Amino acid sequence: MIRMVPLIAALALFAPIEAGAQSNRAPITRGATSGDLAATVTDMRQRMAQMDLEQKRLGDEINRLNGEVETLRFLLSQSRDESERMQQDDQRIGQSIRELTEQNERMRRQISALQEDVSQNRVEIGDVEENAETPPRSEAGTSSDSEVREAGTGSNAQARAADTAQTATMGNPDYQGSLGTLRASDLPGEAGPLFAAAKSRLLKFDYAGAEEAFRAFLDQFSDDPQAGEAQYWLAETLFQQEAYGESGEAYLKMIREYPDDARAPDALVKLARSMRLVGDTDRACEALDVLPQQYPNASGVTRNLAALERTRAGCSA
């Protein structure tokens, strides 16, 4: 009993100290910390799930935007291609306009040349008609006209026919033979009437008859001042009959034998035309190259025809 007194006294001394220590400790509630942590973990998991969903949504949005970017790139590429095509179309249209303008200019020159040819042909027709209506007359021809007028039954055309027949029989009675569709005796024997008869057949599109009449003229009157023109028209009658090779030879002969004739430059151009039509474009271009050298003063019509023929033959500039 006496031994327990000191022990109780010691316990009494330590009791306030333990009570003070316990009062200084943080209060501990059992189960509260684990619940909060679980709630926090759950909240974090929910947030992470939401973030995953947001990240997925953003990924989808990025993919969509990337698709739109690719689409825009494709559309831009198409626009560039379309722009290039439009530029090419503009260039082609511009080239077509230039070609049409050049073609229009060439046609204008051709029309101008044809108009000049028509004017020239009208003058030549007038000359031929004048020569045909007023051929040289002899005493016998005057007698024939007097008889016709006295008879009073002939027209002016019949009188001219009688004059032509009378002149043909008295001009060259020794010229006989056959000229294909024409008898030699049907052709006038003098240079003027024979040339007029040949031109008359040419103007009537009787190319075969005109050919033979011009040949007869050249055979008889090769030194006549109209021989160069006769050679030119002979070549033209051959061309109209599609004898392109023979027409080329006739044009060449005209240029060589009558180089100073007014129609020689035209003959040179038409020689090139005949050579082109027989397939010899090299000789055609050579003939056209000679034109400005041999005939620098050729008319504008001739130069335009030469330019047109150069294009058709494919000659180099």
Image (cartoon, rainbow, N blue to C red):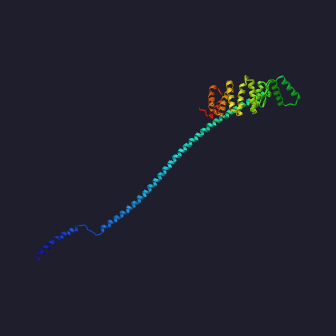
- Quarter where residue 258 is shown: top right
Q: Position of residue 144 (x, y in %)?
A: 85, 26
The residue located at (68%, 29%) in the rendering is 249
The residue located at (52%, 47%) in the rendering is 79
| Residue 103, placed above or below residue 250 | below
The residue located at (56%, 42%) in the rendering is 90
Q: Position of residue 166 (x, y in %)?
A: 83, 26
Query: Which quarter of the figure is the N terminus placed in?
Result: bottom left
The residue located at (39%, 60%) in the rendering is 52
- Quarter where residue 44 is shown: bottom left
Is 97 placed left or right of 224 in the picture?
left
Q: Is residue 196 visible?
A: yes
User: For the view shown, which residue lies furthest in the front direction?
Assistant: 177
Q: Is residue 125 visible?
A: no
Query: Which quarter of the figure is the C terminus placed in?
Result: top right
Q: Position of residue 31 (x, y in %)?
A: 30, 69
Q: How many marks?
A: 0
User: For the view shown, which residue lies furthest in the bottom direction?
Assistant: 1
Q: Position of residue 122 (x, y in %)?
A: 73, 31
| Residue 53, placed above or below residue 93 | below
Q: Nearer the viewer, residue 137 or 208?
A: 208
Q: Nearer the viewer, residue 28 or 155?
A: 155
User: For the view shown, which residue lies furthest in the left direction?
Assistant: 2
